[in-house]
Image (cartoon, rainbow, N blue to C red):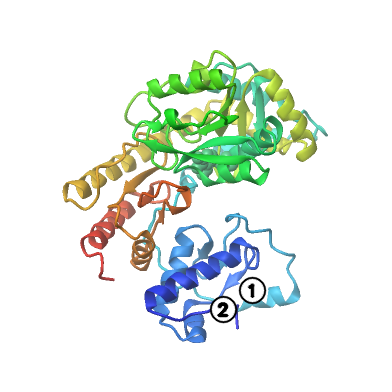
Amino acid sequence: MWMDLFVDGSSRQTSARLFDQIRDAIVTGRLRARDRVPPSRALAVELGVARSTVAAVYARLLAEGFLDARVGDGTFVADGCPMSPAPARSSATGEAERRVDDVTDLVVRADLRTGSPEPGLFPLVDWRRCVTAAAAHRPPGYGDPAGVPALRRAIASWVSRSRGVIASPGQVLVTSGAQQAFDLIARTLLAPGDMVAIEDPGYPQARRAFERHGRIAVPVAVDHDGIDVTSIPHDVRAVYVTPSHQSPTGVTLSSARRRELLALAARQDMIVIEDDYDTEFRYVDRPIEPLRRLDQAGRVLYVGTFSKTLSPSIRLGFVIAESWMIDDLCATRSVVDAQPPHVTQAALAELIMRGAFDRHLRRARRVYRTRHELVARATQSLHEQGLVPAPWRSNAGLHSMLALDPSTATGPLVERLARRGVSVASTEEWSLEVVRPALLIGFALADIAQLGIAFDEITRALQRPRST
Ligand SMILES: Cc1ncc(COP(=O)(O)O)c(C=O)c1O
């Protein structure tokens, strides 16, 4: 027996129960990153259920990032899925298991998962040159925990040029992605029991970073103008927002709300964490000034990442804030991991300073713009056919949200699409109190052809909600 799975009831209940049990096993660490899952045929026989039921459950786990499938190599627990611990060192049995012939039985025709940019767009030739240049010198030993000076300078000048955020290199802290920035801010600038207002729906990993340290996340509703500033409670110490491209709705925080938020921060003596994670890709309108640029009082910590522009595996991001805050964050950082790897930092500094990063962004923006247009048109068409409510306006980034009729059960819809080869997640994980059924349409991993297939399937599924 692979693991203790319990099934009974109708096929829909069976599939929901199987999904919950496998996901829980992953989240609680009973199944670990890179553990292999049995082929759907074998598990179906073991459990006495239809193979299509197991295949649909696997497809949904894949769509939501809990599993990973490689053609010819089988299906595994994904690396880095929420709270899944690192794999144990491989044992003899583990190696033997890895040799078992396992055939991936899920054909993904359209991959709408969010999170990563298109790997094919990565500027490999330039990156290789920059890494070679960075590795040409002997490693310098322990460096500044705030980051390699060349990279702090490069980020300061790039951010001031591209987003109007003016900072000296001393106001830049290089982090291991945006996630480390949230973690350091939670540990350093907030105390146990402090309340942090977060967007609802909002980015789950940021919320987890605050909650992990005993800070209390208070959900605040989001509408078509972004976070509802008037609903932010009076006793919060911080607000976490994604103003340029709200995660997941995609809306832009209006100018009026930005000013209200900063005024509130001043009145209530709170800090604002501005997560600007993907607006290097903006397609339709002019960007609105970042909160950090509008901020007169030094309350805004501006967080950026290279996960969307280059790759999440580069693991580099940054915080821009007042120098005293950077010093405090840096002191925490020095006892956490000293610094990100020197070579990667130095290579990224080269990439930016040589102009190769800007060239890459221009090229990637052109590719994503056509996909963004297709998604906007297809969403509008679904609305005009009466299949979905009015779209949420998303002008930037690598995903848009497809709002669904409030009575839609997203679990079965996601499963049905997965059975038809469309890997897509719902926004369930992003929502706390505000429940609005929606799909997250990522367009970084799916090209125009795949997006066409995906919207055909979505249209069909919404036209015939009960068929399979
Ligand atoms: C809202 C939001 N912020 C930040 C990030 C980037 O995180 P990191 O830089 O840790 O990869 C993501 C990635 O998906 C995101 O969705």
How far across and how far down the image is residue 393, in percent?
31, 36
Classify residue 291 as left or right of residue 139: left
Classify residue 458 as left or right of residue 278: left
Indicate which disc residue 101 carries.
Answer: 2
Q: Nearer the viewer, residue 152 or 361?
A: 152
Indicate which disc residue 98 carries.
Answer: 1
Whether pointer 2 and pointer 1 mark residues with C-beta atoms closer than 8 Å, the reply is: no
How far across and how far down the image is residue 445, in percent?
42, 50
Indicate which disc residue 74 carries.
Answer: none
Residue extending furthest left? 385
Q: Is residue 204 above or below residue 264?
A: below
Q: Nearer the viewer, residue 40 or 333?
A: 333
What's the distance in space between the residues labelled 2 and 1, CA to CA? 8 Å
Image quarter where the C terminus lies is bottom left
Q: Is residue 12 above or below residue 389?
A: below
Task: Assess disc 2: are there few (<14), some (14-19) or many (≥20) residues with their C-alpha within 10 Å of its C-alpha.
Answer: few
Classify residue 171 as left or right of residue 145: left
Quadrant where ligand 1 appears: top right
Where is residue 346, by image quadrant? top right
Residue extending furthest top? 296
- For numbered disc 2, what is the local secondary structure? loop
How far across and how far down the image is residue 403, in percent?
31, 48
Residue 76 appears in the rendering: yes
- In the rendered structure, which amino acid carries the disc numbered 1? Arg
